[in-house]
Image: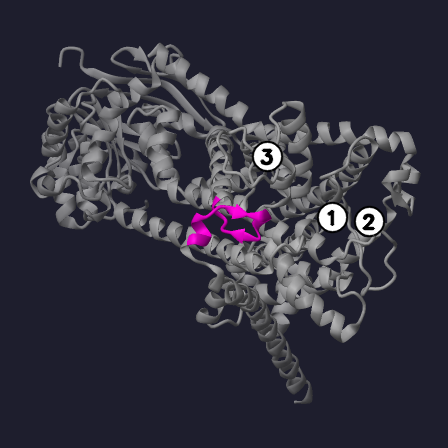
């Protein structure tokens, strides 16, 4: 009996240790990325790093403003299309839908979520980029093509989380609205969506995080020019693509500068994540 | 029947957080009797049963005062083995809960937990347990099919044999016939009457008629207080307490 | 009456817009998949799968990258599954909602949102350089394990949540200890959910590119040990397309990738159904 008891205690300790693995990994990531990146930010000064418009590693110039702006526009563009499309699909899945149509859309979304991101990038490169070049001008490799591809890539995230929060609403919300004589659409638009607001916002934030973090697909279709973009048909570089492109051959200060850009990206993402977690807690609580 | 009392409960109070579920219970339960605990819904019957084998420990914030002695040993003594206690005092819940595995595996679940049991003996134990619950003849040809395919009455007898496989001393039964048809109920009641030769049984009956059919002694629980207890015949014919009388005659409950 | 008609007009317009959104989502999915399969399937042949790439991948097949994909995925799953399942068991079976569990959950939530390029940077500086494991299957697999950990945790936790409390009570009442209860009464019923989490992890490892490039290298040789560098199919596809080595081979590899993910999902569904049938 004693042995059994000791074994149980031991297992519990092991499980506690295992349960802290995620936090440990997160701490290790923070420690190593910051350890590599912070010294450089210190060396050239946060202002020159964040607001510098020139990124010329060979001359020791490390300004990441063009990448921050690039990331912002690409992400913003993807949300512009991704939010209405995702929300509409989530509504389609919860309301109004004949079951067979819902099932088709659901499997389509599953397939979308399963397509490797490089395949998205490739498809953008061979289909979307020539279209944009021929019809709208410019190099085709552009913020517009990047935003379009990203908006498709973040759809599964936005749809699944919004759908969950719409489904989690108590049924009497809907019954109450119907009883007051609202049409089905009024019920959805004025009652259900506002009630599921925090979940929907969380889904958008997570989609935003996904868009900000995407690397390989964006390397393939953004064109990667290091300059301040001036229109949506301009080529651009994001924080992530900059790391992905140059990490292969960077060394010394240059490599540290890439890690420093990683620090900035990491901070932005952590901020967004915390916001999403707080919002979904409020939904649960 | 030399010592007489199997379970002795003294000044027992039980709390869920700040909510008191049982108040000053004093009760002796004798060996080889069927003790039936009556009372309206939410009067603390299930809590009472579960505190006899400390299943109440699973509830967060539960606490108690007073003592419960099993064969003279305090079951809340920190030195006592909880797993051993639960093997000695088995419980059957109000709804049959077969685990999603075969009939054989269900009955073997308890014996297999103490890893000394050998395969050869296991077969014997399982046959004996299923025979004791009068289920053997119905399932002997399909021991390795899923227990979920049994009927409700069969499932409940499976749950009883699952306990019997551990060779317990006390059986706690919490409305074992709720949700069962009259025929299944009759077969379970018959099972109980035969089982009391070997076990001490504490039963929360499905209704008063059931208590009058099977019980040796009866207690009446109301709002966590044991209002009255005594031989079944006396309680049913001349209850001392007005509330017991009202309950038995069906005025409330 | 006029207002009444207006209300239904709005409703009908909304309905049409929502249908259009749903249809265009389906259409985009179909377009991407068909485009890649249409151009890629003709490239596929037995020798495409069984020959190793020659001259940077311009000729030959993709054999070594298939081996690379499998090796990396297996390492990732082997490390992530015990950690993920263990974490979920701790969170759901061993602790109540409180400060510890909230902290752990917050950590998992944050980890789930970390972009793969950051995982790649971390794996590079920690496993490849600091622990001196070089660009290798092990470095890549361990980094990937960290990446898929949150997926496996949340799938397992969902599965545990779905197991009725009564199963646990039955097990305890038969004299089971906590660990016996978890392993014998709870986990068997939760296996399908855990399995689904592992499948999601496998798919994630197959499609991930950034992490692999930064931590496992991009060697086209067939790996000989855990410390060999490898190239996975996704990385191969990326390099073929981005460096314009061969569009034909790129399409072939892309089609193979999509097929692999589909096959993994179909096989997984089949196994789940069989398991469910066996249980009842």
Circles 1 and 2, Cβ within 8 Å, touching? The answer is: yes
Q: Position of residue C192 (x, y in %)?
A: 38, 44
Residue C150 versus residue A16 in the image, above or below: below
Circle 1 residue: A241
Q: Are marks 3 and 1 on the same chain?
A: no
Q: Is residue C182 above or below residue A228?
A: above
Q: Which mark is residue A32?
A: none
* Chain letter of disc 1 in the image: A
Q: Residue pushed farthest bottom?
A: C1
The image quarter in which residue B37 lies: top left
Which span is picked out in magenta? C47-63
Chain that bears disc 2: A
The residue indicated by pointer 2 is A67
| Image quarter (top left, top right, bottom left or bottom right) of the N terminus of chain C | bottom right
**Does the magenta segment cover residue A151?**
no
Residue reaching furthest to the left: B137
Disc 3 and disc 2: Cα gap in Å?
A: 26 Å
Q: Classify B245 as above or below A225.
A: above
Inspect the magenta stretch and tell me whether residue C51 lies in it.
yes
**SS at mark 1 in the image:** helix
Q: Nearer the viewer, residue A239 or C62?
A: C62
Q: Earlier in the sequence, mark 1 or mark 2?
A: 2
Name the residue beneath numbered marker 3: C143
Q: Is residue A117 visible?
A: yes
Kindly state the secondary structure of the residue where label 3 is placed: helix
């Amino acid at each position: 009996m004693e042995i059994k008891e000791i074994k149980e205690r031991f297992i519990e300790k092991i499980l506690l240790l295992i349960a802290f693995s995620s936090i440990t990994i997160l701490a290790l990531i923070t420690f190593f990325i910051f350890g590599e990146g912070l010294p450089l930010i210190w060396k050239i000064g946060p202002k020159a790093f964040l607001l510098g418009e020139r990124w010329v590693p060979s001359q020791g110039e490390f300004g990441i403003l063009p990448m921050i702006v690039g990331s912002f526009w690409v992400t913003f563009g993807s949300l512009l299309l991704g939010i209405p499309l995702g929300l509409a699909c989530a509504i389609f899945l919860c309301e109004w839908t004949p079951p067979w149509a819902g099932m088709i859309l659901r499997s389509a979304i599953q397939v979308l979520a399963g397509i490797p991101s490089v395949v998205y990038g490739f498809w953008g490169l061979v289909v979307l980029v020539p279209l944009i070049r021929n019809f709208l001008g410019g190099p085709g490799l552009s913020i517009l093509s990047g935003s379009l591809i990203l908006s498709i890539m973040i759809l599964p995230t936005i749809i699944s989380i919004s759908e969950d929060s719409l489904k989690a609403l108590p049924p009497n919300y809907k019954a109450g609205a119907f009883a007051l004589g609202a049409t089905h659409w009024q019920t959805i638009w004025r009652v259900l969506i506002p009630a599921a607001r925090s979940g929907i916002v969380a889904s958008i934030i997570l989609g935003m995080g996904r868009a900000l973090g995407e690397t390989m697909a964006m390397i393939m279709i953004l064109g990667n020019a290091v300059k301040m973009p001036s229109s949506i048909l301009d080529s651009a570089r994001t924080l992530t693509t900059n790391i992905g492109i140059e990490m292969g051959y960077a060394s010394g200060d240059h490599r540290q500068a890439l890690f420093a850009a990683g620090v900035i990206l990491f901070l932005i993402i952590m901020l967004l994540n915390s916001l999403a977690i707080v919002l979904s807690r409020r939904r649960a609580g | 029947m030399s010592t007489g009392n199997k379970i002795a409960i003294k000044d027992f109070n039980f709390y869920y957080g700040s909510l008191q579920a049982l108040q000053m219970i004093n009760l002796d339960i004798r060996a080889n009797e069927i003790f039936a605990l009556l009372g309206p819904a939410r009067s603390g019957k299930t809590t009472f049963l579960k505190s006899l084998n400390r299943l109440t420990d699973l509830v967060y914030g539960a606490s108690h005062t007073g003592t419960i002695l099993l064969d003279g040993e305090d079951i809340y003594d920190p030195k006592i083995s909880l797993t051993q206690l639960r093997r000695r005092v088995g419980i059957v819940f109000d709804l049959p809960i077969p685990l999603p595995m075969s009939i054989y595996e269900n009955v073997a679940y308890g014996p297999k937990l103490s890893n000394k049991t050998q395969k050869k003996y296991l077969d014997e134990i399982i046959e004996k347990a299923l025979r004791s619950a009068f289920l053997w003849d119905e399932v002997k040809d399909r021991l390795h099919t899923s227990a979920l395919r049994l009927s409700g009455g069969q499932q409940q007898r499976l749950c009883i044999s699952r306990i019997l496989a551990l060779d317990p001393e006390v059986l706690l039964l919490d409305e074992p016939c709720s949700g069962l048809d009259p025929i299944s109920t009759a077969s379970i009641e018959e099972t109980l009457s035969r089982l009391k030769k070997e076990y001490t049984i504490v039963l929360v009956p499905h209704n008063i008629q059931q208590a009058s059919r099977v019980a040796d002694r009866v207690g009446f629980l109301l709002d966590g207080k044991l209002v009255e207890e005594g031989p079944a015949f006396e309680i049913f014919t001349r209850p001392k307490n007005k509330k017991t009388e009202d309950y038995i005659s069906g005025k409330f409950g | 009456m006029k207002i009444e008609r207006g209300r239904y007009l709005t409703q009908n317009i909304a309905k049409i817009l929502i249908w259009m959104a749903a249809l265009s989502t389906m259409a985009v999915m179909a377009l991407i998949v068909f485009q890649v399969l249409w151009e890629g399937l003709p490239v596929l042949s037995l020798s495409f799968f069984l020959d190793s790439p020659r001259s940077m991948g311009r000729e030959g097949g993709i054999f070594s990258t298939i081996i690379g994909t499998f090796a990396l995925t297996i390492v990732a799953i082997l490390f992530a599954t015990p950690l993920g399942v263990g974490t979920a068991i701790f969170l759901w079976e061993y602790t109540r909602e409180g400060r510890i569990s909230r902290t752990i959950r917050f950590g998992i939530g944050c980890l789930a949102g970390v972009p793969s390029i950051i995982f790649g940077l971390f794996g590079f500086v920690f496993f490849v350089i600091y622990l001196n494991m070089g660009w290798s299957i092990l470095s890549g697999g361990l980094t990937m394990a960290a990446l898929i950990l949150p997926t496996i945790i949340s799938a397992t936790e969902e599965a545990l949540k779905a197991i009725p409390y009564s199963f646990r009570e039955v097990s305890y009442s038969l004299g089971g200890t906590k660990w016996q209860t978890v392993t014998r009464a709870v986990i068997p019923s939760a296996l399908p959910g855990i399995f689904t989490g592992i499948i999601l992890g496998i798919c994630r490892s197959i499609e991930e590119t950034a992490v692999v490039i930064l931590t496992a290298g991009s060697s086209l040789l067939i790996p000989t040990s855990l410390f060999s560098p490898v190239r996975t199919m996704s990385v191969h596809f990326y390099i073929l397309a981005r460096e314009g080595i061969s569009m034909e081979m790129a399409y072939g590899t892309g089609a193979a990738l999509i097929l692999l993910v589909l096959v993994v999902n179909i096989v997984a569904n089949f196994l789940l159904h069989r398991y469910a049938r066996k249980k009842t």
